[in-house]
Amino acid sequence: MEKFLYGTFNYIEPKFSFSKIEENENSLYLDLSNTDLSELLFTVNPIDILRYQKSAFDLDLNYCKYNLPVLKSNIHANISAGITRTYVSDSIVVVGKVLALSNIVNKTNLSTIRYGISLLYNILPDSRYGITFSYDVKKYDCINKNYVSGVSLLGSEYLNNTVHSFGLDAFLELDQSNSMFFKYKLSTLFPLYKGHFIQIQIGYQLDIFKVSK
């Protein structure tokens, strides 16, 4: 048995996601602390863009893949790019050169492109169960005018718009058509910690095509 197998550009994987957010929290509210009057810009934390995202489309291109038959595992390195949509709202008006709050709520559908790289390590001791560890780093850039993604770094003018995510996915097949899964993902900013976002999913999956057979 060979110790490892290597391949490049093995696949392209499209990913769609839609988020159901409670009606009273379905938009990211921006206040005066998010606003730069000198340039009339809203500065948005990329973690909040991720937390309140309504929909997203991403494309993962596999750059290289190592198969490790002896360890029953494989390593993937991917290049990723995509776009997200997030509802944002504010009640800010400019009176002269002063920012003020009004009773009118302005709503915007904020579009953000994100791009970066991801690493995955799959462990598959058996076809019935397995676990995947993942790490990805992505930059978030707002497309809309007057919006910029990032968090200032301790008095610096530089805005950190890079999100680092650590994930764990596990599955267990109960029989040919039924399985259970667990997914965990932690997203955060480095080097300045400005909050984090945790996603956890536990579920049951039924393959209707295998059942119908």
Image (spheres, rainbow, N blue to C red):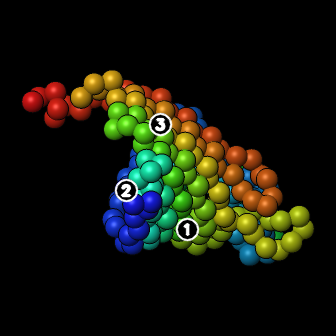
Q: Amino acid at mark 2?
A: Met
Q: Which residue is mark 2?
A: 1
* Residue at 34% over, 38% down: 127
For label 1, the crowd category at 10 Å Cα-Cα, with few meaning under 14, some 14 to 19 and many 20 or more, is some
Nearer-the-camera pick, 50 or 211: 211
Q: Is residue 139 above or below residue 207?
A: below
Q: Amino acid at mark 3?
A: Ala
- The mark lying in front, picked from 3 and 1, is 3
> What secondary structure is found at the residue carrying circle 1?
strand
> What secondary structure is found at the residue carrying circle 2?
loop
Nearer-the-camera pick, 96 or 86: 86
Marks 3 and 2, how far apart at CA: 27 Å
User: Which dot marks residue 170?
Assistant: 3
Label pair 3/2, CB-CB below 8 angstroms: no
Marks 3 and 1, how far apart at CA: 24 Å
List x then y, in percent, for residue 53: 52, 50
Q: Amino acid at mark 1?
A: Gly
For label 3, the crowd category at 10 Å Cα-Cα, with few meaning under 14, some 14 to 19 and many 20 or more, is some
Q: Earlier in the sequence, mark 3 or mark 1?
A: 1
Residue 208: image quadrant is top left
For the question of whether residue 188 can be seen, the reply is yes
Q: Earlier in the sequence, mark 1 or mark 2?
A: 2
Nearer-the-camera pick, 103 or 18: 18
Q: Is residue 180 above or below residue 6?
A: above
Residue 148: image quadrant is bottom right
For the question of whether residue 83 can be seen, the reply is no
* Residue at 77% over, 52% down: 194
Q: Which residue is mark 1?
A: 116
The quarter of the rendered structure image containing the C terminus is top left
Marks 1 and 2, how far apart at CA: 34 Å
The quarter of the rendered structure image containing the N terminus is bottom left
